[in-house]
Image (tube, helix red, strand yellow):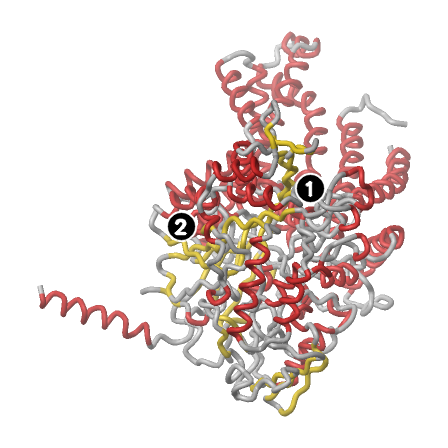
């Protein structure tokens, strides 16, 4: 297992380098211009100078090499320096990956937004799992009952109605009509006492619910299918024949075994949490990573988009590995060596 | 009855009295939403409207434009002119006197050195200053004494109010930015996010692409202003959501740039929490007519003067008929509501420059358009499309992707079909269409189409540079990397002559006459087909008072005077 992990980790290095090159080329070849969204009153010669100042005049391999150095050498050095409160090497003049729109280090922008994304999108993932697992288990246990039908119906809705529709619908009902929740997320709110905690819960309620519905719909279907596979297995009949009560049969024997594929699905879904929920964050004005990405794309802020997508790629590769390892731990029959 | 009105009057006077004497910070907190989030608070490094307007709460120019487009002294004592001796007789220099006693928010004094520094900062090579156009033809900027700045130009400037006028050209503090000149400009994150200013507010917290919180500047020159103690400048989302937050839920007090379907905006306003406000500047939505041939067969000569004239748009009768077939009022009503009025000019404002010579285009006349084409020899074929000598009237009509523009395209296509013109519609993502990517065939400069539609305008109130866009030397071509503003590829020596005449004329009335003549020449030659004079639309909460919506400067220009109705 350890051998396998090390081998896989080493293999991720060329994979990630290749991914970073592909992302860079895709972004570079796409017709896009960081000065495209500026007012037309700014003349063309000035735009040309802005592009030059951003480094767009250099050939593509120079820019790619610069990004590689900035991301893999300068950023970690900077991070190390910050942790140890010291200056490593030429820390004053070290070039970090800098966003074109804000002219500030991309990594700082990401760090600033990570908490909101983890809170809102992460919480919705947890809530989604907590809803999905019981629903999936009971739906499978009472297959074709009214509960199963209702669960199927709700998860179909959750899965097929897009979040930009449910989000706006909820704003119209709960913010405009009932006035229970704010329609715009206040990102400057600090939780210091009970009333600010209340405000934080109120403003998180709608985005978390919308996303949780979507996540729960997906996971509950996996859970149900996996339970159904196991419920008809011989070992279940054996367990019942031993005289175990239904509770133990379903919740201990069947659930444990059914969770194996579901855990893999959940692990593979974690990078999406970091990726943020682009549409939902935009609808509720949550300043998460998804919103950062969409603003970067709209403004052709290539260093920002490049770095964010690359970080997502790293997470996806990493969580694939974690899912594989988890699978081996949960299911002793599976061995990679 | 009389008693009642006296009492009411007294009550009103009592209610108003404390407001008039209100002190700094009395109105509490102000919530502003710009659905495009602020990226940076240094307008010299951004140029985006949202960034310029947010920074205008903090840093200020020497003079700015009021809501009627008049120049008003801001940090300067008065507007320099030839009459008061501020502008030299040869029109080659302008001298500004700064108001004494103005302090930066850190307590130090504003001096002429800050203005000199600002000019050098923006004019530094490698800095990529987005507002460099304001410093065009500046030879040097010097401090005569602590409160006097002299700007010298390399040639006579009849309108010398480029540097230090308007929200695009504010003054930044020399002490703060001294290590940020030229190539170092982008690395000064702290300075760019927290500029020290003379304006009514100072930055408290800045989160790029999200939100800015500000509080009242303790050193602001008027001790009773601003009335708001703090403000939140939120970004993100979309125009409809921003409108909703002011008009329906009342969470915000001011929302900017509400390009939303007019009927939806009206429904939202019916909730009664806020009011939709608009102001008209110089923006005109227009059709650009390609005078050159965009035929792909021409290869590198496509849409260039060398490629030859357009097969049918070079015929004045066709251009005239295309314009006559359009019902501008309908386009304005459907797409723009209170933010639009039909226009026949590319230069619709300020009032002294607005021509009335072309107003006949306001009335749609399909019959007359058909007659013009008949007379010119364009005969309808079996498919109803007109043709002459084997050339069919078939138009490729491109614009940027935007719901209102696609509605306009559909309407125009319908009207043109009624005069026997076939139209193919195309829309291109705005970042590509307006971007300068040399490798993309879809930019508005390359104009690989017969007609294209977009809006343009100019900063401030002087149209000289703007009207210069349609001179021969401004024609985009591969030789100048397609950098040029003359999209129609219009070239008329008489027009160029008027343009150079305007560059040497100082008298405002003479300049107005020349600008009108140039506008009329462009309109009568059909180089452009203007459609709608566009205003900007914002919304304010009914409790937010003192807002004077301004299309000539930042909408935040008088935020120091804003207050909350009690």
Q: Position of residue B518 (x, y in %)?
A: 58, 62
Label of residue B247 in the image: 2
Q: Residue at x 72, y 33 (%)?
A: A268
Judge by depth and name the residue closer to the eye, B357 or B220: B357
Mark 1 near mark 2, Cβ–Cβ under 8 Å? Answer: no
Q: Position of residue B193 (x, y in %)?
A: 64, 66
From what the image shows, is residue B324 above or below residue B215?
above
Q: Secondary structure at mark 2?
A: helix
Q: Secondary structure at mark 1?
A: loop
Residue assigned mark 1:
B449
Judge by depth and name the residue closer to the eye, B331 or A120: B331
**Cα separation between marks 1 and 2:** 41 Å
First in sequence, mark 1 or 2: give its number. 2
Q: Position of residue A113 (x, y in %)?
A: 64, 52
Q: Quadrant of the C terminus of chain A?
A: top right
From what the image shows, is residue A256 above or below residue A88?
above
* Mark 1 belongs to chain: B
Q: Quadrant of the N terminus of chain A?
A: top right
Mark 1: give few (<14), some (14-19) or many (20+) Cα within 10 Å.
many
Q: Is residue B542 visible?
A: yes
Q: Position of residue B319 (x, y in %)?
A: 59, 44
Judge by depth and name the residue closer to the eye, B152 or A111: B152
Which quadrant of the structure image shows residue A55?
bottom right
Relative to B48, A185 lies left or right? left
Question: In the orientation shown, which residue stands out farthest toward the bottom?
Answer: B145
Q: Residue at x 82, y 41 (%)?
A: B299
Q: Residue at x 52, y 24 (%)?
A: A154
* Mark 2 belongs to chain: B
């Amino acid at each position: 297992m350890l051998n396998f992990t090390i081998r896989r980790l080493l293999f991720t290095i060329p994979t990630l380098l290749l991914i970073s090159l592909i992302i860079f080329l895709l972004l570079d070849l796409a017709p896009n211009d960081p000065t495209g969204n500026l007012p037309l009153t700014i003349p063309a010669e000035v735009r040309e100078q802005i592009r030059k100042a951003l480094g767009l005049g250099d050939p593509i391999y120079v820019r790619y090499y610069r990004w590689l150095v900035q991301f893999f050498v300068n950023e970690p050095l900077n991070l190390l320096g910050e942790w140890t409160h010291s200056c490593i090497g030429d820390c004053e003049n070290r070039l970090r990956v800098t966003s074109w729109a804000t002219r500030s280090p991309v990594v700082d922008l990401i760090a600033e937004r990570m908490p909101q994304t983890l809170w809102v999108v992460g919480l919705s993932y947890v809530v989604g799992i907590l809803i999905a697992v019981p629903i999936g288990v009971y739906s499978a246990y009472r297959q074709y009952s009214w509960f199963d039908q209702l669960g199927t119906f709700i998860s179909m809705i959750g899965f097929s109605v897009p979040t930009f529709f449910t989000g706006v619908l909820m704003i119209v009902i709960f913010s405009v009509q009932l006035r229970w929740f704010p329609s715009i997320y206040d990102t400057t709110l600090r939780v210091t006492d009970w009333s600010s905690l209340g405000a934080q819960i109120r403003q998180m309620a709608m985005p978390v619910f919308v996303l949780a519905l979507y996540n729960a719909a997906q996971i509950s279907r996996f859970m149900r299918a996996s339970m159904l596979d196991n419920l008809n297995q011989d070992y279940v009949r054996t367990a019942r024949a031993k005289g175990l009560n239904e509770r133990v049969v379903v919740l201990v024997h069947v659930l444990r075994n059914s969770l194996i594929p579901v855990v893999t699905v959940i692990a593979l879904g974690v990078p999406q949490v970091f990726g943020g929920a682009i549409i939902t964050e935009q609808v509720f004005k949550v300043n998460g990573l998804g919103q950062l990405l969409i603003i970067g794309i709209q403004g052709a802020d290539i260093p920002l988009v490049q770095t964010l997508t690359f970080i997502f790629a790293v997470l996806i590769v990493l969580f694939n590995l974690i899912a594989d390892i988890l699978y081996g731990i949960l299911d002793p029959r599976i061995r990679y060596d | 009855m009389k008693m009642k009105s006296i009492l009411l009057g007294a009550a009103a006077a009592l209610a108003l009295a404390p407001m008039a004497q209100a002190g700094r910070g009395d109105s509490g907190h102000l919530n502003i939403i710009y659905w495009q989030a602020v990226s940076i608070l240094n307008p010299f490094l951004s140029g985006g409207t949202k960034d310029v307007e947010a920074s205008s709460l903090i840093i200020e120019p020497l003079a700015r434009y009021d809501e009627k487009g008049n120049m008003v002294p801001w940090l300067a004592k008065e507007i320099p002119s030839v009459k008061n001796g501020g502008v030299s007789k040869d029109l080659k220099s302008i001298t500004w006197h700064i108001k004494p006693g103005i302090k930066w928010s850190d307590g130090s004094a504003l001096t002429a050195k800050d203005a000199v520094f600002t000019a050098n900062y923006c004019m530094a090579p490698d800095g990529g200053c987005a507002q460099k156009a304001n410093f065009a033809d500046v030879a040097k900027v010097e401090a005569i004494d602590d409160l006097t700045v002299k700007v010298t130009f390399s040639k006579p400037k009849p309108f010398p109010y480029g540097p230090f006028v308007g929200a695009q050209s504010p003054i930044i503090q020399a002490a703060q930015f001294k290590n940020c000149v030229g190539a170092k400009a982008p690395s000064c994150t702290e300075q760019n996010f927290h500029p020290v200013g003379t304006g009514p507010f100072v930055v408290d917290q800045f989160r790029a692409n999200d939100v800015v919180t500000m509080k009242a500047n303790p050193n602001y020159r008027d001790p009773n202003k601003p009335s708001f103690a703090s403000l939140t400048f939120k970004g993100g989302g979309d125009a409809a959501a921003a409108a909703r937050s002011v008009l329906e839920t009342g969470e915000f007090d001011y929302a900017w740039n509400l390009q939303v379907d007019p009927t939806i905006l009206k429904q939202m306003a019916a909730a009664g929490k806020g009011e939709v406000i608009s102001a008209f500047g110089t923006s005109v939505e227009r059709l650009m007519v390609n005078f050159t041939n965009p035929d792909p067969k021409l290869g590198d000569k496509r849409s260039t003067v060398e490629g030859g004239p357009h097969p049918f748009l070079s015929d004045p009768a066709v251009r005239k008929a295309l314009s006559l077939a359009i019902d501008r009022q309908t386009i304005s009503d459907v797409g723009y509501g209170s933010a639009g009025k039909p226009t026949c000019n590319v230069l619709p404002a300020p009032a002294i420059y607005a021509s009335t010579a072309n107003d006949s285009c306001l009335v749609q006349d399909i019959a007359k358009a058909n007659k013009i084409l008949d007379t010119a020899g364009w005969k309808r074929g079996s498919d109803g499309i007109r043709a002459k000598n084997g050339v069919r009237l078939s138009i490729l009509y491109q614009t940027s992707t935007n719901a209102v523009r696609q509605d306009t395209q559909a309407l125009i296509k319908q009207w043109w079909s009624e005069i026997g013109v076939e139209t193919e519609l195309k829309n291109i993502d705005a970042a590509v269409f307006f971007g300068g990517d040399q490798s993309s065939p879809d930019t508005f400069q390359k104009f690989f189409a017969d007609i294209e539609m977009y809006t343009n305008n100019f900063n401030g109130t002087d149209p000289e540079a703007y009207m210069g866009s349609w001179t021969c030397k401004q024609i985009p071509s591969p030789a100048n990397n397609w950098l040029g503003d003359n999209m129609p590829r219009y070239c008329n020596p008489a027009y160029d002559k008027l343009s150079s005449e305007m560059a040497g004329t100082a008298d405002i009335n003479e300049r107005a006459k020349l600008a009108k003549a140039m506008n009329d020449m462009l309109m009568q030659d059909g180089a452009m087909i203007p459609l709608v004079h566009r205003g900007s639309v914002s919304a304010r909460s009914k409790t937010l008072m003192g807002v004077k919506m301004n299309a000539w400067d930042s909408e935040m220009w008088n935020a120091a005077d804003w207050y909350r109705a009690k």
